[in-house]
Amino acid sequence: MLLLKQLKTTDCEALTVDLYDAAYMDVSGIAVLLEVLRAAHTARRAFHLSGLRDRPRFLLEATRLLHLFQDASR
């Protein structure tokens, strides 16, 4: 997966994913984000989400997972 590959590069200290144009997300999208978050913690790197709105934000809020991603859009 591209995000995991990026985390493994030596010059990556923090990874931010911009979800501004993401109009839809389901539980498989959350699973991917959680996998990347776990890999970032293991690699001692920061992982942030930005541009959250509409359905993706609602889904992360409803599952009480939003705080895990240190939402950079606020």
Image: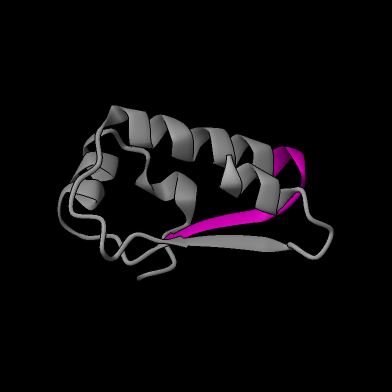
* Residue span colored magenta: 41-49
Q: Which x, y percent locates residue 6?
A: 67, 53
- Locate residue 22 relative to residue 70 in the image: left or right: left
Residue that sits furthest to the bottom in the current view: 74
Residue 29 versus residue 72: which sits nearer the camera? 29
Q: Is residue 41 above or below residue 28?
A: below
Q: Which x, y percent locates residue 34?
A: 49, 35
- Locate residue 51 relative to residue 39 in the image: left or right: left
- Locate residue 23 relative to residue 44 in the image: left or right: left
Q: Is residue 52 above or below residue 26?
A: below
In the rendered image, residue 56 lying in the magenta stretch gets the answer no
Q: Is residue 56 above or below residue 17?
A: above
Q: How many marks?
A: 0
Residue that sits furthest to the front in the current view: 2
Q: Which x, y percent locates residue 7?
A: 69, 51
**Quarter assignment of residue 19:** bottom left
Residue appearing at x 76%, y 48% in the figure = 8
Residue 34 versus residue 22: which sits nearer the camera? 22
Residue appearing at x 46%, y 35% in the figure = 32
Q: Which x, y percent locates residue 67?
A: 41, 48
Q: Is residue 53 above or below residue 26?
A: below
> What is the quadrant of the C terminus in the image?
bottom left
In the rendered image, residue 46 lying in the magenta stretch gets the answer yes
**Quarter assignment of residue 40:** top right
Looking at the picture, the colour scheme in use is one colour
Residue that sits furthest to the right in the current view: 10
> What is the quadrant of the N terminus in the image?
top right
Residue appearing at x 34%, y 28% in the figure = 28
